[in-house]
Image (cartoon, rainbow, N blue to C red):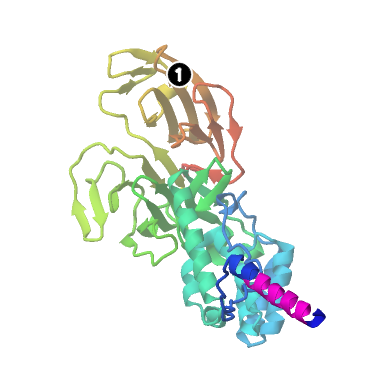
Amino acid sequence: MLLHARALALRALVALSLIVVACAPRQDIVPDPEPVYVEPPPPPRPPVPARWSVAIEDLGWAQVPEEPSKAAFRSNTEGWRLHEDGNWAGSRAAFAEAVRELPEYDLARYNLACAYSRVGQLEQALETLTDVLVRDLPRFRRRAREDQDLQRLRSSALREELDWRVDRIAQAWERALRGGVSAVAWRRLTRTRIAQAQDSQGQLLRPGVWVDEIRRFLPAMELYEGVHAGYVDTVHEQAIVVTAERTADAPPLFASAHLYVVPLVPVGDDPHDTTLTYDKLGTIEVHAVPSGARFRMNHYKTAWQVLDAAGVTRDQQATPSRPVMFVTPDGALLTSPIPEGWAVKNRTVTTPGGHAIRVQSVQSISNYRSLVLNGDGTQAVLVGVRAKCSKDGPDLRHAVDRLDLAQRRAVPLSQGEGPAAAAFGPDGALYVQVEDRTRRYGDPRSERFETLPEGVVLVPPLDGPTCK
């Protein structure tokens, strides 16, 4: 019985188990998924250094470079001798010494870049050449593209970086040129041994622009030998340059006078200048026109002509509408003809509306007069210069009056010995040159002014006249 009872209990337990299993929720059996390969994240890239860039504040010159000292000139000359002999390591040391003596010695710094390239120090060559191009792109750009001393740099892996830098410098340079006022970097001809060794380079005369926003001067064209006078017309984007020698005549005349018209853009590219050559001239008057220059010689004795890529053609004899550079063997004047509708007689300026304004008494004896108007015609400046030979000898003096057109009165700005010139900048400021210093009136109606760095002038100053 006991066995039978156990059998019955076992049967009951099995039946109960079947019931529990039947009542439990069903679960689908899902096979484990195949493992999927996941690409690991790439390792972090090292930070890329910012590519080189140039600030407009670095362009050009904060001041006109001084003539190289004897030590700097001697080191650069010794470096050139060693370089010509193929001793590039020796020339590198000599050029570096010249730069240490005068950091603004651009020619020595350029030579140092060439020496670095020759000895294979290409990164140093790139940095040194960059410094030179930032300071004076017009003078060195074409040379850097053609100079065999820099071939190793140009054919290296740094070529792309060099091209990048030159393009950025050129773009910044062109923007700056368009925002400046025409000026000349001028250093008087010296008679030192260095100046004699450099031939005419003892005198510096580089047409360019003064950009007051950054307080710097930017040369606008290549370095020409024997430049006698020049200026930049920013509207027509070209420079006009006169190179000449003085004859032994009394008064002197021009010998081998060359008139150049040089486009400013692209900066430092092949100049494609237009040239005219004359001898035995006493004066040249020239001003810019689109793609050329308008000129006449010997002051009122010849007709106006136009020099452009097609050559020389006769022009209509109308009054110039641009500033005129009046050039003599004794120097130059920057003049602005009396505009149509205005009149200047003795001590009176008559406006187009018929209003008379009295000016300084010295204006009545001036033989060169300029009436300069600002962009909107609300401001005017009268500049009178007397340059004559009197019984007492050379007579050179000036008078500058600012014309207050609203109040119809003249405000004297300067009177005294020596020449003067005036111009309005694109920012509306008034620039007045008295002898060899230039003032800037930020507000043309104010008497307050600041003086530009020594050697930055509107036009190379007239020294004469030379009298018999």
* Above or below: residue 198 compared with residue 31: above
Question: How many labels were placed on the picture?
Answer: 1
User: In the rendering, at what x and y percent does residue 21 appear?
Assistant: 63, 70
Q: Is residue 419 visible?
A: yes
* Above or below: residue 210 compared with residue 108: above
| Quarter of the C terminus within the rendering | top left
User: In the rendering, at what x and y percent does residue 433 appear?
Assistant: 52, 36
Residue at horizontal 74%, vertical 64%? 101
Q: Is residue 124 visible?
A: no
Q: Amino acid at mark 1?
A: Ser
Residue under pointer 1: 361
Residue at horizontal 53%, vertical 62%? 200
Overall secondary structure of the magenta section: helix
| Quarter of the N terminus within the rendering | bottom right
Residue at horizontal 38%, vertical 64%? 271
Q: Nearer the viewer, residue 320 or 173?
A: 173
Q: Quadrant of residue 100?
A: bottom right
Residue range in magenta is 4-18
Q: Nearer the viewer, residue 19 or 301?
A: 19
**Secondary structure of residue under mark 1:** helix
Asked if residue 41 lies in the magenta stretch, the reply is no
Q: Nearer the viewer, residue 296 or 106?
A: 106
